[in-house]
Image (tube, helix red, strand yellow):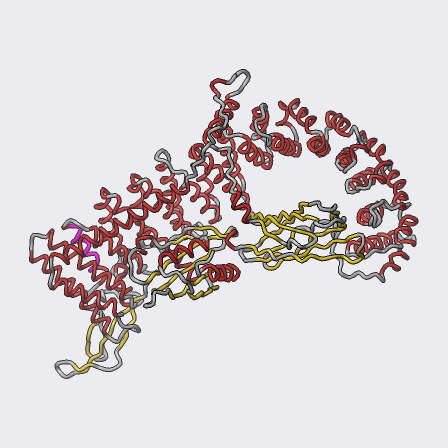
Amino acid sequence: MDKPCTLLVHFDKGSAAMANEIKADLEGSDVAAKVEAMKRAVMLLLNGETLPTLFITIVRYVLPSEDHTIQKLLLLYLEIIDKRDSAGRGLPEMILICQNLRNNLQHPNEYIRGVTLRFLCRLSEPEVLEPLVPSILENLEHRHHFIRRHALSAISSIYRLPHGDQLIPDAPELVERALASEQDASARRNAFLMLCLCGQERAVAYLFSNAERVTEWPDLLQMAAVDLIRKVCRSPNRADKGRYIKIIISLLSSPSTAVVYECAGAIVSLSSAPTAVRAAANTYCQLLTSQSDNNVRLILLDRLNELRTSHRDVMVDVVMDVLRALASPNLDVKRKVLDLVLDLLTPRNVEEVVLYLKKEVVKTQSGELEKGGEYRQMLVQAIHSCAVEYPEVAGSVVHLLMDFLGDTNVAAAVDVVLFVREIIETNPKLRVSMIQRLSDTFYQIRASRVCSIALWILGEYSLSLAEVESAISTIKQCLGDLPFFTVSEEGETTDSSKPAQPMVNSVTVSSRRPVVLADGTYATQSAATEAISTPSVTPGSFASTLNLRSLILSGDFFLAAVVACTLTKLVLRLEEVQPSKVEANKACTGALLVMTSILQLGLSSYLPQPIDNDSYDRIVLCVRLLCNTGDDVRKIWLKSCRQSFAKMLAEKQYRETEELKAKAQISHAQPDDLIDFYHLKSRRGMSQLELEDEVQDDLKAATGGFTKETDDANRLNRILQLTGFSDPVYAEAFVTVHHYDIVLDVTVINRTKETLQNLCLELATMGDLKLVDRPQNYTLAPESSKQIRANIKVSSTETGVIFGNIVYETSNVMERSVVVLNDIHIDIMDYISPATCADVTFRNMWAEFEWENKVAVNTVIQDEKEFLNHVIKSTNMKCLTPPSALDGECGFLAANLYAKSVFGEDALVNISIEKQVDGKLSGYIRIRSKTQGIALSLGDKITLKQKGGS
C-alpha cells in the first residue's frame, strides 16, 4: 500500500497458489471462466500479490476478447499493475497494450469507448498516453454524449499531468470550442471544470458571456460556476466582484436546493452588503422549512448562527421565519432554533416571539407531541429568558405558564415556578394577580420541590390582609384535617381527614402494640398515607386538594419544615396588617397546631423514616418564634429573605452582563492603514448592491475587520522538536488542531553531505486517533529541507500519542537507516472549552454519568481561591459556583466546574478542599463524564498541573 491506489476491493480468501488456476482459465475458451479468473487476478493484485507471469498470458488470451465484461476487467487489471520499474522508467511491455487501447478508442461500441476513456483518466505514464492523444481528440466530436463526456475528462486529466501541456498543448482551446456547442449537462460540466482548472480566464469569459442564461443552466454546471466564483474572488480588491455577486444572486432562484445552499454560502463569503446577507438569510430560512431531513436542518441552523455572529442586525428581520422550524418533531432542531432566536431578541420583535412561544406551549397540552414534556420545559426556559431580558412581556405569559405548575414533568414544573419566583420580584405590577393565581392553583402541584418554592413565594409576597388570609387558608386546605393520625378503639380505625367518600389510595398503618386509654380500654393508633400522585383524582375534588398532606405523609419532612416557615411568615405579617388581635391570635394558634401535628407525626413510629434533625430543629424554632416574637427576629423573617433573593438576582444579572462584555470583540485598524471614502469614488455603472458592498468593505477596513491577529508566541509554542540536533536528519513539527482533525506540518532537513533517497516519514497513533494518509517517499538533496504534511482524524476527547520514525537510504549504505522521533502528545485542552449549564442540569448529569475519576489534592498553593483559579486556568473550564458563594474566609471551599468538548461530551468537576492547621490544602477533585476517556485524561491533566507548575 506504499503506492497510490485508485481501486480497493476486499478479498481475504486468496493465495499465490491460485495463480496457476487463473492462468489455465485465462488460456481456455470459456468466457464465464475467463471473467471469474480476471476477477480473482484483480483481487489478488489488490491484496499485495505480484503475479509477474500473468501479464503475457493476458496480452495473448484476454486482449483479443470482444466480451464487454472481460474488457472492463482488463482495464481494471491495467489500472492496478505496476507500469514502471524500480528506477522509475516505464516498462517496455506497456507498449503492447497501446494498440489495444487505440482500437478500443475507435471501437464501434460506445460502452467500450467510454470505459477506455475513463481508464485513461487514471493513467500517468506519458509514453503510454502520447500515441493515444489523436484518438482521444477524435472522440470529442462523437455523436454520443457518453463518449464526449469521458473524452473531456480524459483531456483534463492528461493536461494536468506534470508534462501534460506538451501532450495536448491546445487543450483549453479545444475544450472551449467543445463547450460552446455541447448540449449534454454532464459533458458541459466536465468541459467547464477543465477550463476552471487549466484555463481560468477562458472559464470566466464563458461565464460572463452567458451571465443572463446562468439560471437556465443544469444544476451540475451551476455548481461548477459557483465553485469558480469562490476561487476567483479569493484574491482581495477585485474590481469586478459585483458582477460575480449578481450572478450568484440570480442563482438563488434555482430549483436545485444544493445550488441554492452553495450560493447562499458563497454570497456571504464574498460580500458584507446588507442586501446580499439578507438574501442568504432568507434562502437558509426557506430551506429550513422545506427540508425534512433533520441533519440538513441542523446544518442550516449552524449557518444561520454563523450569520448571527457577524450580521446580527440583518438576522433580526428573519427571526419569525426561523421560528417556523419549531414544527420539526426533532428535539435537537427545536433546541437549536430556540437558542438562535433568544440571541436575536430586540424590543421590536420580542412580543411576536413570545406570542409564538405561547402558542407552542398550548400545543404541548394536547398530548399529540412526542416528548411533549421536554419540549414544554424548553419553551418555559425560553420564555423565562425573554421575560428576564424584556420584563414588559412577562404579564402576557406568566398566567398561562402558571397552569403548568402541576405538570407531570417535574423538570418543566420546576422551571415554571422558578420563572414565577423571578418575575414576581422583578415585576411588582404583576405581584397581586400572580399571588392570587398561585393561591388558586396551588392544590394542583404534585412535586415536592415545586411545592417548596411556591410556599416560599406565598410567604414572601403575600402582603395585604386578603392575600395573607387566602394563603393561610390555601395551605390549611391542602394539609387537610388535623391531626395527621387519630386514636380509636381496638378493631376500629378512623382517619381524621376522611371525607364522606372513601379516600383515594389511602393506606392504614397500625402500631405494633396497643395503647391503654383513660377508661382502661385498649386502642391502636393509625395514620392514613396517600400516594404522591393519584391520577384517578379529578381536579377540584376534595382528595385532590390534599397535595401537601400526601407529600408529608410520604415522609417528606423537608417540605413540612417549609410549610412551618411559610405559616410563621404569614402569621407575623398578619399581625402587622390585621387590626383585630383576636383574628391574629386565632391564625397563630392554627399555625402552632399544624406544626405540633407535624412534630407528633415525625416523632411517631408509624412512618418508615422518622423526622430528620434539621427539619425538627427548624419547626421547633418556628414554634418558639410564634410564642415569643421580637422586633429584630420579625425584621429578619419578613425582610431579610426577600432582600437576599433580590441581591442574588442582581448578581446574576451583573454576571451575565459581564460575560456579554467579555464576548464582545473589539477590532482596531492600524494607524497607517489605507481607508477609501466611497463618497469620493466614481459611482458610474455601479449597482446598489455594488455600492453597499464597497461601503461595507470600507467600514471593515476602518474598524479592523480585515486584520487577522496572529499570535507568533503561541505559534512558536506549537512547534515540537522531533529529532536531536546531532541526528543526520533534523525534523520538527508544527501541530495545528482543528475540531475533528490534527494537521502535522513536519519540516525535515538533511544535515549530511549525501543525497537521501526514499526518505519516508512513518507515523503511528495511540488512542482515538487515526492516520488519514501515509506520507510518500521523497529524495532529499544534501543540506536541503522538505515540508511533509500528515492528517490525523480525531474521534473523541482523549489524550492521544503520535509516534513514529524517519526511514531513508543513502548510496553508500545498503541497509535503510532509521531515526526515531520524539512522541507527540495531543493535549485534551485543545478539545474542551468552557460552557455553562443550569444547576439542575449539572446535578442531573452528575447523577447519570457513570465514569468518575477521584484525584486527591496535592499542591504547594495554600490559598483556597488561588488553587481554584489555578485549576480553572489549567483545565480550561468554567466555574458554575457564583463568586458570592465563594466569598469569605472559612477554611473550606466547594465549587462546580463545567466544560463541553467539540464532540458534545460533558465534563463535570467538583472541587472540595479544606485548609489544614499547618496551612496546607487537602481534599478531593472529582471528575465525572459519560465516557471513560475524558474522565481519565482530565484527571491526568489535573494531577500534572495542580501542584502549581506551568
Would residue 312 be counted in the magenta stretch? Answer: no
Across and down, in percent, residue 620 comes to 18, 67
Across and down, in percent, residue 285 comes to 49, 36
What is the number of callouts on the image?
A: 0
Identity of the residue drawn at 34% across and 52% down: 415
Residue 229 location, quadrant? top right
Q: Tell me: residue 531, above or below residue 378.
A: below
- Magenta region: 466-476
Would residue 471 be counted in the magenta stretch? Answer: yes
Asked whether the viewer can see residue 764, the reply is no
Across and down, in percent, residue 930 comes to 49, 60
Nearer-the-camera pick, 935 or 368: 935
Q: Tell me: residue 211, above or below residue 949.
A: above
- The reply, left or right, for residue 434 in relation to residue 304 is left
Residue 269 location, quadrant? top right
The secondary structure that dominates the magenta segment is helix
Q: Tell me: residue 299, above or below residue 214.
A: below
